[in-house]
């Protein structure tokens, strides 16, 4: 079992803890409790809501993320396509009840959860969702939820639009900007290429661990240092990287 002190001893001040898509992951409350109080930079890549497994809960996940933000003010929360879809659907609807009764409501499982639990979305949760960012960049990294469309030539985040930031499942070979650190597209394990890192591994599925990647803000090509696996009561640190610098 990994101890927090051991992890903090492994981390460099330039190492980011990257929390992938959650979709209400049942493993996230334990992961959030483990990271609580840490001083390392932390970022969550969006898609906190809309569950994909019967053991998951949008409400539990977003509350755990809010509590983590209180304990770790440095935490940055990005917006995923599911948060954007929720906001867009509510904006199109006359009121919350109309949103829940809409024929499109089945696409947003979080709506049903909020309706059953609160008969609406609490103000603090709505404020938290609206405060999420479309991207965050450091000296060497660009964190986004999605990617950069396959046929696009770009080298700066200002050249990416919401279709790229929230929806693109691919990263263009012609992306020449800072290394993209992304979620959205499911891979087996975190993997690094010459211009991006995939961090979403489907940790909201009941039989899979939630994986928090460790990514270093460095000029060196290899930035993925490893990851932390959370599964039930087990916490494991995996060091090293899967990388293909020829992508």
Image: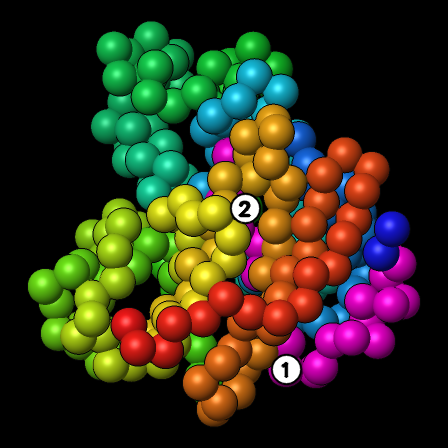
Q: Label 2 belongs to which residue?
A: 128
**Bounds of the magenta segment:** 3-24
* 124, above or below 34, in the image: above
Residue 192 placement: quadrant: bottom left
In-image side of 98 versus 148 (left or right)? right
Q: Label 1 belongs to which residue?
A: 14
Sequence-wise, the earlier of marks 1 and 2 is: 1
Q: Please provide percent x and percent y for residue 53.
A: 53, 22
Mark 1 surroundings: few (<14), some (14-19) or many (≥20) residues within 10 A = few
Residue 203 placement: quadrant: top right
Q: Please provide percent x and percent y for residue 104.
A: 26, 17
Residue 117 placement: quadrant: top right
Give me the residue at 46% from left, 62% from top: 191
* 184, above or below 38, in the image: above
Mark 2 surroundings: few (<14), some (14-19) or many (≥20) residues within 10 A = some
In-image side of 207 versus 121 (left or right)? right
Residue at the limit of the structure toward the left, as seen here: 151
Q: Please provide percent x and percent y for residue 73.
A: 69, 63
Q: Secondary structure at mark 2?
A: helix
């Amino acid at each position: 079992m990994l101890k927090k002190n051991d992890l903090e001893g492994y981390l460099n001040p330039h190492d980011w803890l990257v929390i992938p898509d959650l979709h209400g992951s049942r493993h996230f409350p334990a992961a959030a409790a483990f990271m609580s109080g840490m001083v390392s930079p932390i970022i969550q890549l969006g898609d906190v809501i809309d569950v994909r497994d019967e053991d998951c809960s949008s409400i539990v996940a977003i509350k755990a993320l809010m509590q983590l933000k209180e304990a770790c003010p440095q935490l940055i929360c990005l917006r995923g396509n599911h948060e954007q879809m929720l906001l867009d659907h509510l904006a199109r609807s006359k009121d919350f009840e109309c949103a829940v009764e809409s024929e499109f409501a089945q696409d947003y499982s979080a709506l049903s959860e909020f309706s059953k639990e609160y008969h609406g979305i609490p103000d603090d949760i709505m404020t938290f969702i609206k405060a999420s960012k479309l991207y965050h960049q450091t000296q060497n990294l660009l964190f986004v939820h999605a990617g950069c469309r396959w046929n696009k030539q770009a080298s700066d985040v200002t050249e990416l639009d919401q279709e790229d930031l929230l929806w693109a499942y691919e990263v263009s070979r012609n992306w020449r900007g800072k290394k993209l650190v992304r979620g959205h597209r499911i891979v087996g394990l975190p993997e690094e290429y010459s211009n991006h890192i995939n961090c979403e591994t489907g940790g909201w599925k009941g039989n899979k661990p939630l994986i928090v990647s460790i990514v270093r803000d460095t000029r060196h090509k290899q930035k993925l240092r490893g990851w932390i696996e959370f599964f039930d009561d087990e916490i494991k640190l995996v060091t090293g990287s899967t990388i293909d610098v020829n992508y």
